[in-house]
Image: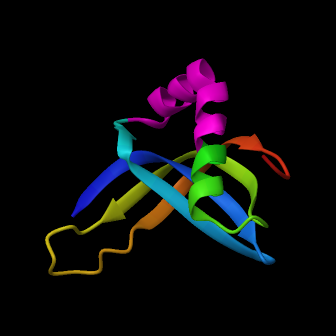
């Protein structure tokens, strides 16, 4: 089982909330994630906008993003759907 502090984004798509997390950039503590976001807020939001345009329906709206604790099993023997807890919102809005 692997755990990390990750960045998450909540999108509303056709009235339903969908959560996306990034294992590509992890942190050992919420504080480091928050510091990274504050130093790179414009780039992070632009990256989410690009991700949304390339991977989600046009109706998708980013409503929240932040840092969270995520746990998952990647060895092929368990449920690989991550469990996300301890969300710390850093940005809230209604659209990109």
Residue at image coords 81%, 77%: 15
x then y, percent, for residue 81 = 38, 74
Q: Main secondary structure of the magenta part?
A: helix
Q: Quadrant of the rendered structure where residue 43 is?
A: top right
- Residue 35: x and y in percent read 54, 23
Name the one closer to the observer, 17 or 5.
17
Indicate the quadrant containing the N terminus: top left, top right, bottom left or bottom right.
Answer: bottom left
**Residue 34: x percent and y percent?**
56, 30
Whether 23 is among the magenta residues is no
What residue is shown at x 30% (from left), y 74% (from top)? 80
Is 28 rendered above or below residue 6? above
Quadrant of residue 29 within the rendered picture: top left
Residue numbers of the magenta segment: 29-47
Residue at 65% in and 36% down: 46
Left-right relation of 36 to 70: right
| Front residue of 36 and 31 | 36
Where residue 10 sits, quadrant-wise, is bottom right
Label count reads: 0
> Where's residue 94, x and y in %?
85, 52
Residue 35 in the magenta stretch? The answer is yes
Q: Is residue 25 above or below residue 53?
A: above
Q: How is the image coloured?
A: rainbow
Q: Residue furthest right?
A: 94
Q: Residue furthest top?
A: 39
């Amino acid at each position: 089982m692997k755990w990390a502090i990750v960045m998450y984004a909540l999108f509303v798509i056709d009235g339903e909330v969908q959560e996306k997390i990034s294992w590509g950039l992890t942190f050992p503590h919420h504080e480091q994630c928050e510091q990274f976001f504050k130093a790179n807020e414009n780039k992070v939001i632009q990256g989410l906008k690009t991700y949304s345009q390339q991977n989600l329906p046009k109706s998708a709206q980013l409503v929240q993003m932040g840092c969270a604790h995520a746990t998952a099993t990647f060895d092929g023997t368990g449920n690989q759907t991550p469990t996300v807890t301890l969300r710390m919102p850093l940005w809230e809005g209604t659209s990109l």
